[in-house]
């Protein structure tokens, strides 16, 4: 069977799928890259955009502005969720990555504190608010778009693109940071080198914007009637409050475990366990590469046996191995590699398929905002505070209390898995 242009239909479908995956994946990678490079280059940002009179206060202020991005995420989830459910998934995704690019460029070209005083710090705050809004809107928009575009028998596998592309973005930011700090002198890094990753992020974001502008809208959104698209939002949110609570319950264990084992543990190993920072970097890279490899495995498995069994295995495995892996991690890079790899393998089970699960819980008319708001609130409340809570409890000799906290949250997520219907193979076009 061929089209009028003489191109086989299956080839056109393949190209359309590839365009969808690339357009969604590159934008998501840019968002995660932005967050990674801010954390990596925060000491340089503090030196350039805050007063040098008190370096400690400048660094703490830089971290506080990083936290502001988390506060903005729920608002982004609502705003871009509303756009996605009223105007279109594609439009929401395109605006989100455009805002992320703007925020990154603002940081990259921001004048120094020495040049303009406190305005430099204010501009950084504005840029992070923009990025927080964008990131709060990116995940629900891209998750919804990808889930609706995926063939229903492969939706679990397609959903893995979210964390695959996100982790690639984090690795790209980490490796660029390592390369720049090795190639450039500290003087050059402080003067202009730290700006390079943000400008690169802005350029990549603009490219992703162009890619997304060329995507098609989902059939599920286009199948909705004008009346459905303009049904009042808040009554729908209230009617689906159970599903919103389920999103929070399913997310709470995953987000804390991921932030601890996927993001914070290398820094903990370097600062507290006194491992070499270069060795912790490579241990993290190895573990995250294995995480990327594990994601499609879990996604395909969920398409075969169902979402619920995979989520239970994932959370139960992470809970079961949390304490043993914590005890194993002492002072050796191989221990860091093993502990991170084991934990991220199990975390990958939930991370791989939650985009599909969330989309399958809600009807088309509220799918984006229904996921975006509770998800962003949960990540900001539990994921965003996990590193601080772990460090604080450790500083007062109560490190095991945090470990209990993490395992309890995983148990809560397991309990919520039993509260949801099995959604494997659900038709989202008429949902």
Image: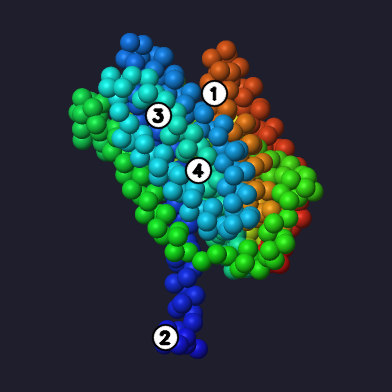
Q: Residue 197's image quarter?
A: top left
Q: Could you classify mark 3 by the number of other residues whose Cα lies within 10 Å: few (under 14), some (14-19), or many (20 or more)?
A: some
Q: Please give the name of the residue rendered at 47% of the width and 38% of the height, measured from the top-left corner.
A: 131
**Disc on the earlier residue, 2 or 1:** 2
Q: Is residue 398 above or below residue 149?
A: above
Residues at discs 2 and 1 in contact (Cβ within 8 Å):
no
Point out the frontmost of discs 1 and 3: 3
Instruction: In the rendered view, tell whether residue 280 sits above or below residue 234.
Output: above
Label drawn at residue 5: 2
Gap in angstroms between the C-alphas marked 2 and 4:
39 Å
Check disc 3 and report the residue beneath it. Answer: 123
Which of marks 3 and 1 precedes in the sequence? 3
Label 4 Cα neighbours within 10 Å, binned few <14 / some 14-19 / many ≥20: many
What is the residue that sits farthest to the top in this orientation? 53
Label 2: element kind: loop
Quick check: 224 left or right of 150? right
Q: Which residue is mark 4?
A: 134
Q: Nearer the viewer, mark 2 or mark 1?
A: 2
Q: Earlier in the sequence, mark 4 or mark 1?
A: 4
Report the residue marked by disc 1.
388
The residue depicted at 41 percent of the width and 87 percent of the height is 6
Q: Nearer the viewer, residue 151 or 348?
A: 151
The x, y position of residue 153, in whole percent, is 62, 68
How far apart are labels 1 and 3 at the CA level?
Answer: 25 Å
Residue at image location 44% in from the left, 37% down from the top:
35
Callouts 4 and 1 close, C-beta under 8 Å: no
């Amino acid at each position: 069977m061929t089209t009028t242009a003489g191109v086989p239909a299956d080839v056109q479908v393949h190209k359309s799928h590839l365009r969808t995956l690339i357009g969604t994946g590159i934008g998501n990678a840019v968002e995660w890259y932005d967050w990674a490079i801010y954390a990596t280059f925060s000491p340089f940002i503090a030196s350039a955009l805050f007063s040098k009179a008190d370096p400690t206060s400048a660094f703490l202020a830089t971290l506080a502005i990083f936290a502001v991005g988390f506060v903005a995420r729920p608002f982004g989830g609502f705003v871009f969720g509303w756009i996605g459910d009223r105007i279109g998934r594609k439009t929401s995704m395109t605006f989100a990555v455009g805002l992320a690019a703007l925020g990154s460029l603002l940081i990259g070209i921001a004048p120094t504190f020495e040049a303009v005083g406190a305005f430099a710090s204010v501009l950084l705050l504005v840029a992070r608010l923009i990025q927080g809004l964008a990131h709060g809107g990116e995940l629900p928009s891209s998750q919804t778009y990808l889930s609706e575009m995926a063939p229903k028998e492969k939706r679990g596998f397609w959903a893995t693109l979210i964390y695959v592309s996100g982790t690639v973005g984090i690795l790209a930011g980490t490796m660029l940071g390592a390369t720049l700090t090795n190639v450039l002198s500290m003087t050059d890094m402080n003067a202009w080198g730290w700006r390079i990753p943000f400008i690169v992020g802005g350029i990549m974001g603009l490219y992703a914007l162009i890619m997304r502008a060329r995507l098609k809208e989902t059939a599920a959104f286009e199948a909705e009637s004008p009346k459905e698209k303009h049904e009042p939002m808040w009554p729908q949110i209230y009617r689906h409050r159970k599903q919103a609570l389920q999103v929070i319950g399913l997310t709470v264990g995953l987000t804390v475990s991921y932030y601890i084992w996927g993001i914070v543990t290398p820094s903990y190993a370097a600062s507290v366990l006194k491992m070499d920072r270069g060795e912790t970097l490579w241990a993290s890279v190895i573990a995250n590469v294995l995480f990327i490899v594990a994601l499609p495995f879990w996604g395909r498995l969920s398409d075969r046996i169902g979402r619920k069994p995979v989520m239970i295995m994932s959370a139960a495995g992470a809970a079961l191995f949390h304490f043993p892996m914590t005890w194993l991690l002492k002072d050796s890079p191989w221990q860091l590699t093993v502990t991170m790899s084991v934990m991220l393998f199990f975390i990958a089970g939930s991370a791989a398929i939650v985009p599909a699960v969330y989309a399958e819980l809600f009807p088309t008319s509220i799918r984006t905002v229904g996921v975006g708001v509770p998800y962003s609130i949960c990540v900001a409340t539990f994921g965003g505070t996990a590193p601080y809570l772990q460090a604080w409890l450790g500083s007062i000799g109560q490190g095991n209390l945090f470990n209990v906290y993490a395992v309890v949250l995983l148990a809560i997520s397991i309990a919520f898995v039993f509260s949801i219907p099995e959604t494997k193979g659900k038709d989202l076009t008429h949902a």
